Amino acid sequence: MIADTLHAAIVLATPLLLAALGGLVNRVGGIVNIGLEAMMTAGALCALVVSSASGSWLAGAAAGALCGALIATPMSLVITRLGANEIIVGLGLNIAVAALVRYLLKQQWQTTGTLELPGVVRLPTIDIPGLKGLPLLDALLSGHDPLTWFAWIAVPVTAWVLRSTRVGLRLRASGSAELAARAQGLRPLNLRDASSVVAGAFAGLAGAQLSLGLIGLFNEQLIAGRGFIALAAFYFGRSRPLPTAMACLLFAFFDALQIRLQGAQLPSELLQTLPYVAVVAALGVGAALARRRQGVSR
């Protein structure tokens, strides 16, 4: 049971991790991206449609990333060029995209709620030989799709880019010291817009992983608040990739656990709250530790 739960947790953590890494990059650049939910929704739908039409999961994943990036661009421009409130713009985007998706399902495919298309090519799984006799290692490393591998490889890559490259230094300067960045000849608004495009692409990939990897169809409730969980994850990780990834894995573990406990004689409604309670508890513990560190530093 433990091995199966760990395997399920890694699978369920993938969309959270992709969206959280994108939101983290955006946050470092100076924008709190509340619209991750909308970008994941659009990416999930685009990925499914393109995969069905092209017969290629890779084309579907690329379409999901592109769709997320395209949605993120006008959102970012409204914030950076027109000075709109990022919270209001993000919430408005979530509502608008949800309504647009509902309209498209009715008008284009004459369906409501759920869309199933023929010929959808789902994400393949990568099995590593030689791990069958090692249940824990097999659960951790084998049987995962390419986007799961991409998400976890992106964690150290993102940390390295933000900390050790010129692009990362400029992005951090734009997010934390805009006047100093301008004094150095940088264009903070352009860098923020670029970080929003990256966030949209990652969120679109997260949606693609849900529609092409987990279930092979699209549903209006597919994202189910995962964009906001991703938001909580990079806040818990204080915009650091590794703690952010651990926060995503923590939520996914409790999500997988509540699915495993569905067969027990426990109310399913209470079990479904388990991962969200875990997130609130983790945020509370993180805030308490941060306050304690601030008290010690004083």
Image: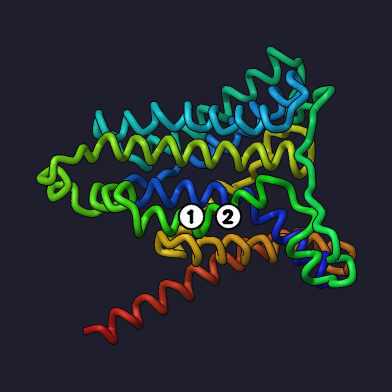
Q: Give the residue drawn at x 25%, y 29%.
A: 82
Q: Residue at x 78, y 23 (%)?
A: 55
- Residue 14: image x %, image y %? 64, 52
Q: Which mark is residue 153?
A: 2
For the N terminus, give its image quadrant. Answer: bottom right
Is the residue 127 above or below the residue 4 in the image? above
Query: Residue 256, labelled with which disc?
Result: none
Badge 1: residue crowd in 10 Å (few <14, some 14–19, many ≥20): few
Tag 1–tag 2 contact (CB < 8 Å): yes
Amino acid type, residue under disc 1 in the picture: Val
Residue 20, image x and y in percent? 51, 52
Q: Which residue is mark 1?
A: 157
Q: How many marks?
A: 2
* Res. 271 visible in picture: no
Which amino acid type is marked by label 2?
Answer: Ile
Indicate whether 176 appears above or below 182. Answer: below
Query: Would you place residue 29 above or below residue 64 in this image?
Result: below
Q: Residue furthest front?
A: 130
Q: Is residue 262 left or right of residue 291?
A: right
